[in-house]
Amino acid sequence: MLEVKKEPREREIEVMRALIRDRGSYLYCLVDAAKQAGVDWEGIARAGMTQFGCLKYQAKFTQVKGLDDFLETYLTPETKKIFDSDLIERDENHAVIKAGYCPLMHAWMECGGNDAEIAKLCDIAMDSDRTQVNSIPALHFSLRRSLAEGDPQCEFLVELEKNKEGEA
């Protein structure tokens, strides 16, 4: 059984966490309704999260050219507090970001999701992050660890894309 582990934060950060949990509850309820309707709920949810990732890219990341720009845009002080996240590894070719709390996962647990459903919803929700980062020509995003899979933290790997000769 998955657990929610979070450090309490100041009121403003807790309000932002609650807003993200609401977004997670929306996704859970939409997916549940699609399942009940017998439609391709996973395909629909993935398409929606990919579309959302495109919107996020357009809103925040079109001027990002490399890792430094990305980290400055993505890993804000507020983001660090909301997700208990931080940069844990960095060199000229890659960065690893950890997140110790996920408001979305918290919401899915509150909605009654089981471990398998939560892991699936997490992977679907990550389509947004994959899309927004992978839309940046110089970068590639991958998920190395996941709270929803029972890991103690999420770990996101962001790498410079390699050219055809295999160089970053």
Image (spheres, grey):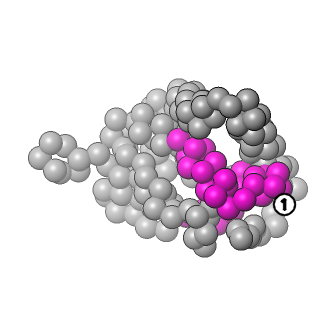
Question: What residue lies at 88% left-to-right and 56% top-to-bottom?
Answer: 11
Side (left or right) of 100 relative to 143: right
Question: What residue lies at 46% left-to-right and 62% top-to-bottom?
Answer: 144
Does the magenta segment cover residue 126? yes
Confirm whether residue 49 shows in the render: no
Q: Nearest the camera: 151 or 158?
A: 151
* Magenta span dominant secondary structure: helix
- Residue 44 placement: quadrant: top right
Q: Which residue is mark 1?
A: 10
Confirm whether residue 10 shows in the render: yes
- The N terminus, quarter of image: bottom right
The answer to whether 54 is drawn above or below residue 163 in the figure is above
Q: Nearest the camera: 56 or 102?
A: 102
Residue 86 point in image, percent of width and height: 57, 63
Residue 49 point in image, percent of width and height: 59, 35
The answer to whether 29 is drawn above or below residue 123 in the figure is above
The answer to whether 133 is drawn above or below residue 92 in the figure is above
Residue 45 point in image, percent of width and height: 61, 34
Looking at the rendering, the stretch of residues picked out in magenta corresponds to 98-127
Question: What residue lies at 78% left-to-right and 48% top-to-bottom?
Answer: 21
